[in-house]
Image (tube, rainbow, N blue to C red):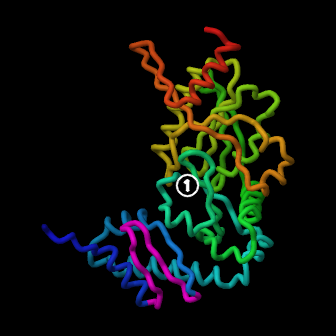
Amino acid sequence: MSAPAPDIIGDALLRAFAERGMAATLPQPDTLRLTLPDGTATTRDIAEWRRYAGRNSRADLPGIAAQYAEQTATMFARSATHSDTRNLLDGERLRLRLYPDEALTPEMRSALVTRPLAPGLLETVVVDYPDSLMPLNRGELDGVTEEAAFGAALEASLDREEHYSRTDDIQGVPIMHVGGTHRYVGSHVHVLSRYVDPAAARYGALVAFPIPEYVVVHVIGPVHLFAAFETMHELVERHFQAGEKAITPRLYWWRPGPYEQLPERQALHSGQVPALVPVGLKVDHQEKSIQPTTAETDQLIELWLRDNPM
């Protein structure tokens, strides 16, 4: 049995942290585990950094690893300047970012302030710095509840970051983009009632999060549901393929419910999330057939066809 190939990139990174007095290990190739001076352990996803480092020569690796280690050490030093997380809440530096499930290992999920938003999607509280962001560790909450941290992150993401909403007619299907030039736009799923009147959205809406800068919404109504599915699938897939740090090409069915009935600020701090379930429809024009991808898709089609018979 042959010996495993040496991890040249990983070894260079571990040496760089050791030279800065930081204990680092690689429990998985794409997961960096750091033990901070106060004994707190934290993890970071280094998959993207590995890809970047792998595109460079072996001679450049020590410098690239040193730069990454230095930046990471600086971020943790910044975090240490806060006496506790309450200062972050007061300073409105917390933000909310969406990640696909596969972006965070189980170990990372247990270490970070994160929670499920919907199947395949996670919400994570991050600290926003002028030149970077850093996920918030549960060990840094220091008496602040997770609900308070999520609530503060949501409020700051919604009200302190510029955004816009625009509705376009795409192949006869009205589709709204809530967008911004930052990576926290996904937070707007918590306030969809700002853009969609729940009382008028009898069937809810198709919602997608292809990239951090967009939330894509189609309010289900008189436009044929199958056409809406097909147009949304195509548009969201294009965004997903073209964007940086893409999240997911999945479509979700949003149905206004108890979350939207709460006063907005109470909802943001409630620890609850909007009702979102994955839906999808495979359309074969040659065979003139459709295939729902989830049981919830069947439910949506049945609901819509009841009032819109073909």
Q: What residue appears at the point 82 percent right and 30 percent down from the top-left corner?
A: 199
Q: What residue appears at the point 39 percent right and 74 percent down from the top-left corner?
A: 26
**Residue bounds of the magenta highlight:** 20-38
- Lateral position of residue 304 relative to residue 263, left or right: left
Residue 23 x/y as whole percent: 45, 85
Q: Quadrant of the N terminus?
A: bottom left
Q: Is residue 176 above or below residue 191?
A: above
Q: Quadrant of the C terminus?
A: top right
Q: Name, please, the residue furthest toward the left.
A: 1
Give the residue number, with chain letter if any, for mark 1: 99
Q: What residue appears at the point 80 percent right and 27 percent down from the top-left corner?
A: 200
Q: Is residue 39 above or below residue 119?
A: below
**Residue 6 appears in the figure:** yes
Q: Residues within 10 Å of mark 1 (few under 14, many from 20)?
A: many
Q: Amino acid at mark 1?
A: Tyr
- Lateral position of residue 157 relative to residue 124, left or right: right
Total residue callouts: 1
Residue 97 x/y as whole percent: 62, 57
Q: Dot 1 lies on which element?
A: strand
Q: Is residue 32 magenta?
A: yes
Q: What residue appears at the point 53 percent right and 75 percent down from the top-left corner?
A: 42
Residue 289 x/y as whole percent: 45, 15
**Residue 183 appears in the figure:** no
Q: Quadrant of residue 178?
A: top right
Q: Name, please, the residue furthest toward the right.
A: 263
Q: Quadrant of residue 224?
A: top right
Residue 31 x/y as whole percent: 43, 68
Q: Is residue 234 magenta?
A: no
